[in-house]
Image (cartoon, rainbow, N blue to C red):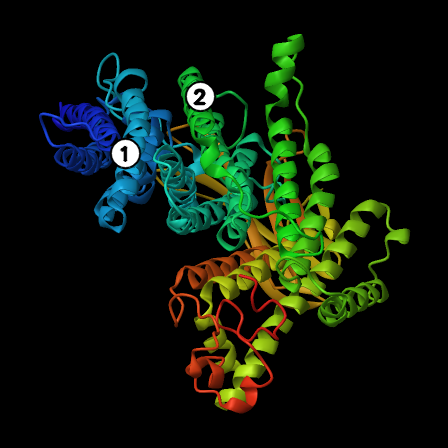
Amino acid sequence: MHPMPYFGSAAILVALGLAVYSLLAGTIGLYALAKNRPLAIPAERLRETSRRAGIMTFVCISCAAFALVWAAFTDDYSVDYILHHTNHALPWYYKFSALWSGQEGSLVLWAWLLSAYGFVLRLRHKTDITLHAYASTILSGIQIFFFSLLVFAAPPFAFAPGPLQPDGFGLNPLLQYPEMVIHPPMLYLGYVGFSIPFAFALGALMMRYPGDKWIHITRRWTMVTWLFLTCGIVLGMHWAYAVLGWGGYWGWDPVENASLLPWLAGTAFLHSVMMQEKRGMLKTWNMWLIFVTFMLSILGTLLTRSGLVSSVHAFAQSSIGTYFAWFLVVVFAVCLFTFFLQRDHLKTENHLESFVSREASFLFNNWILLLSCFVVLWGTLFPVISEYVNGTKTTVGPPYYNRVMVPIGLFLIFLTGVGPLLAWRATSVKAIRRNFVLPCIAVIGTAIILMISGVQPWKDESAQTSIYALVCMALSAGVITAITAEFLRGAAVLHQQTGKNLASSAILLTRRNTRRYGGYIIHFGIVVMFIGLAGGAFNQSKEMEMSFGDSVQIGSWKLVCKSFSQDSNPNYDTSYALMDVFHNGKYVTRLTPERRFYTASQQPSTMVAIHSTLARDLYVVYEGQNPDTQRPIIKIFLNPLVNWIWLGVVVVVFGTFIALVPPLIPGKIRQTASDPRLATDPTGIGAGPAYAAKSSLGPDGLPAKLPGANHA
């Protein structure tokens, strides 16, 4: 019997005690400060001990997580969780991933990441001591819930019943893929991370925080969390594409949807928050967007780990859904009570002046994002609702989502291109004509080129799908043109003033306003992803039994079966095919699709063979043998533009990093009559008076003559 299980259990229990103290001490201290009431212990000291107790929760839960991983690495099958999620022959990196492969371990990961976020927040408390104290105290309340689950409902160190087993039951075969070592932690970094913006928003509302400084703090935390969630979602898409063997990457599975819901709400917040920063608008809207995003994160965890809905992605199901449901009720009640108590603090300072303005585009963007969020949520929960209403669980599949979400996605692409070309408050007709000419030409030209190249919906059996793909690619070309034009206009101005080439000028332009141009890069990446998604309208597939020497033609590709073979290792047995690939008669490569059978779990799994190019993927699956003929079954997909999805997310990650970097010149530069430097140097980089006569500065320090220079 190893001592680590006892150590881990004790660490979780101590973490729970520290979180309770942090909540109580923080609440009492903040209440005393707010009401200016003396205490036996000074309120500032009580608040500081609360912060330190919160820091120590991270140390304790880290010890518990280490103890669980140690038990996995040392094959301690006296722990029931280790017995059911590992085995002796499992490679070390998959033993590490056992931490999140089951219910109890995933809750340890949730609690550990939450405490890690809290650790960073509490170390940065001097940024704004009172606001951070409120956020820290609220975070302690969330920690209490998860620590309580680990102590009372799902203890990770429970001992296995009966005699000690010589080997474990193994890790789920679907999790034995390299990407699954990083996909769940990345996804959970997104889920958990929304706790921090939620804590700041609720704390700011409770204390009636003056001004919008809390928005700046919250926005940066939200961007980091949004980035993690984006990467987690796309890694999950790639895992589904490479492992499940169905030729796709997004099937509108309930757990896939659960990750998309907070992403949509968080994306809406990141856009609408600019209206509060620039114009003092949508204060109530933004507050509730943060609240809803956090609650959707909890709902996503509930769907993923509770067994409420059935999913190929739900690896750790249990009966703790009731706890999460009550937690959601408590969170909603606290948010609602605080909002009604302090709602007069959220009065708007300005109102929408024109529907042809940047504010209107953000507002439409928010409506569409929240509409898509509702559509996905309704489809995900419909089986639960239908079972409750009429006793029969009725599911909705991809046709429902595609019918509704595809038009919504196209409208979002349209708004992505239009938004940067509009000014705040109102946009003149002259500016509209000037800014929209090139994007419109790009849209029409791309549509014509695609139709000439063979994308002709009127000749396609699935005409609606082809029309959507055609519109998506044409709109994407318009958005890319609009974004490129924004960079080129600004770079041309700086090129005239500095003599730098356009590339160097574009880099300098981006460094001067990282948030704005980083946002453009993110939009560029999203559009690239949409182009990849549109390629799915032209997928082809074939399935056939193949013996030695048989061949199959799909498009301009030919596959020849050279042989079938078998192999084994302590972890699994495998059968695989050797397929030579030819393109237009020329040999390209050899693919080896596999079918594995894992010894410990007695479960099969597929390993897909993929030959990827920027234009298309050749995707080959070994589906096993026909039980009647004993001949191997090979399924082949030809999937256009899939790599554009993975390329697009790389661009999104890059753009997010750019947006998070502080600008080259901090703060906003406003032109004033009393500032002679600005009168002769409108760009702030040594421009002369000649250009000053032609231009004035926008609020971000860029020439206002540039379309969108004063936008964000």
Up-down relation of residue 211 to residue 509 (above or below)? above
Nearer-the-camera pick, 55 or 681: 681
* Residue 27 percent location from the top left of the image: 25, 27
Q: Could you tell whether 106 is left or right of 147 in the image?
A: right
Q: Quadrant of residue 135?
A: top left
Q: Residues within 10 Å of mark 2 (few under 14, many from 20)?
A: few
Up-down relation of residue 697 to residue 647 (above or below)? below
Question: Which residue is situated farthest in the left direction here?
Answer: 40
Q: How many marks?
A: 2
* Residue 190 percent location from the top left of the image: 42, 42
Nearer-the-camera pick, 151 or 261: 261
Q: Which residue is mark 1?
A: 88
Residue located at (60% from left, 63% from top): 613
Q: Residues within 10 Å of mark 1 (few under 14, many from 20)?
A: many
Quick one: label 2 or label 1, which is nearer the N terminus? 1
Question: Which residue is situated farthest in the top direction here?
Answer: 391
Position of the N terminus, as image quadrant, is top left
